[in-house]
């Protein structure tokens, strides 16, 4: 019972840390934009809109515009190089930042995962769900092996392609299976396994 409580509490802490950091950053950003929004809000003829103070709406609008401008800047090579240098030398040394970056990256950059093929990979007498990230030559493929219940926490390995069985699942569907600890995967995983064993 104590072990269950301990692991559950620690799991909750790890789950909450990136959320709390995200909310703290957004809260601080709103405080900064609020100072810019106050003079602009006084120029408008109304004080509230749908129950919300105009100054808060203006501050939120400024924050959205700043994020949009930052997104445009992030597309430039110089900005990417600057951010990569900052992350490598400072931010990646903060565990909570690395975790949050991994999780948000999986949501905000779908182009990085859309070409990844879900597969079953054979390891001696067992099979494991993975993603074929890319082919690396010599009949080998680079795989990401997702963890459970957090599919974006896993390991990377290289295997020969003859050990792979493609799955008719997308990234999101595999993530759902991992979060459910594999429950409900009989049809998705059972049929490919039976087909392989029949060969």
Image: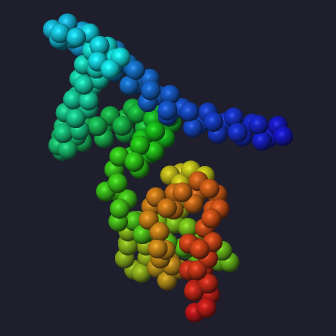
Q: Quadrant of residue 33?
A: top left
Q: Position of residue 31 (x, y in %)?
A: 34, 15
Which residue sits furthest bottom?
Answer: 199
- Looking at the picture, tell me which residue is in the foreground, 112 or 191: 191
The colour scheme used here is: rainbow
Is residue 173 left or right of 42 when viewed as pictured? right
Q: Is residue 156 left or right of residue 112?
A: right
Total numbered labels placed on residues in the image: 0
Residue 91, position in %: x, y? 40, 33
Q: Nearer the viewer, residue 17 or 68?
A: 68
Residue shown at 43%/73% (left/top)? 141
Say if residue 33 shows up in the picture. Answer: no
In the depicted structure, whether residue 35 falls above or below residue 7: above
Which sits in the foreground, 168 or 92? 168
Q: Is residue 178 left or right of residue 88?
A: right
Q: Please name the residue shown 51% across and 66% down the image.
A: 130
Tell which residue pokes out farthest to the front in this image: 50
Q: Quadrant of the C terminus?
A: bottom right
Residue 81 in the image, given as x and y percentages of width and height: 24, 41
Residue nearest the observer in this picture, 96 or 40: 40
When the figure is inspected, residue 75 is found, relative to residue 29, above or below; the finding is below
Where residue 5 appears, as percent x and y from the top left, is 76, 37
Q: Residue at x 56, y 50 (%)?
A: 150
- Which residue is located at x 84 percent, y 40 percent? 1
Q: Taking the image as drawn, is residue 86 in sight?
A: yes
């Amino acid at each position: 019972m104590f072990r269950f409580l301990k692991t559950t509490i620690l799991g909750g802490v790890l789950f909450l840390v990136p959320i709390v950091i995200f909310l703290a950053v957004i809260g601080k950003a709103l405080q900064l934009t609020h100072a810019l929004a106050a003079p602009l809000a006084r120029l408008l003829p109304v004080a509230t809109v749908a129950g919300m103070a105009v100054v808060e709406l203006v501050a939120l609008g400024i924050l959205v515009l700043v994020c949009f401008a930052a997104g445009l800047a992030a597309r430039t090579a110089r900005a990417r190089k600057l951010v990569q240098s900052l992350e490598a030398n400072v931010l990646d040394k903060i565990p909570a930042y690395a975790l949050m970056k991994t999780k948000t990256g999986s949501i905000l950059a779908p182009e990085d995962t859309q070409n990844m093929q879900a597969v079953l990979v054979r390891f001696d007498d067992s099979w494991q769900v993975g993603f074929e990230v890319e082919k690396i030559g010599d009949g080998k493929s680079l795989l990401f092996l997702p963890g459970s219940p957090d599919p974006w926490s896993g390991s990377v390995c290289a295997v020969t392609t003859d050990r792979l069985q493609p799955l008719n699942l997308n990234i999101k569907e595999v993530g759902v299976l991992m979060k459910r600890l594999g429950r409900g995967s009989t049809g998705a995983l059972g049929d490919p396994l039976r087909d392989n064993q029949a060969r």
